[in-house]
Image (cartoon, grey):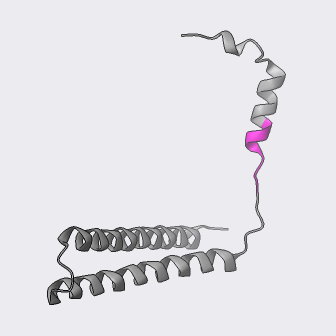
Amino acid sequence: MDITALHNVTSEYLKNVVDASQQVHVEDESFDNVLQSAMDMINEANYLQNKSEEAEMEFMLGYSTNPHALMAVQEKADIALNYTMTVKDKVLDAYKELMNMQI
């Protein structure tokens, strides 16, 4: 194991690293921005689900004969829906945890 790069590590350097890691960086992000981001994610998942249904109907009616393209559109919609549901579940878990906190 090569440790030659560690020659400038002093106790003052370590103290500065610890101090920097303990500082909380708060960005000016309001609840409105977070809510808008969540709504955009839901709208995108809805859009992809609608495109998936359109591609499925085109395939069934014979307008599209490429099953690979159909599967790609369906998989993209499925991933977006699963991601949205996972985020929703995590938000609800965080809300429940906040509600159970005693002040």
Depth order, front residue of 22/63 = 63
Q: Nearer the viewer, residue 74 or 26?
A: 74
- The residue at 42%/83% (across/down) is 47
Q: Which residue: 55% across, 76% down?
A: 38
Dividing the picture into quadrants, the one containing residue 39 is bottom right
User: Measuring 47% from the left and 79% from the top, which residue is drawn there?
Assistant: 44
- The percent position of residue 85, horizontal first and vertical second, equals 40, 73
User: For this view, does 2 lie left or right of residue 16?
Assistant: left
Image x and y of residue 96, in percent = 51, 72
On screen, residue 21 above or below 61: above
Q: Position of residue 41 (x, y in %)?
A: 50, 76
x and y percentages locating residue 86 in the rendered image: 41, 68
> Quadrant of residue 8 in the image?
top right
Quarter of the image with the C terminus in it: bottom right
Which quadrant is the N terminus positioned in? Answer: top right
Magenta stretch, residue numbers: 19-25
- Does 21 sit above or below residue 74? above
* Drawn side of residue 23 relative to residue 91, left or right: right
Residue drawn 53% across the image and 67% down it: 94
Which of the 4 image quadrants contains residue 21? top right
Depth check: give the residue in front, 18 or 48.
Answer: 48
Asked whether residue 42 is drawn in magenta, I would say no
Establish if 42 lies above or below 10: below
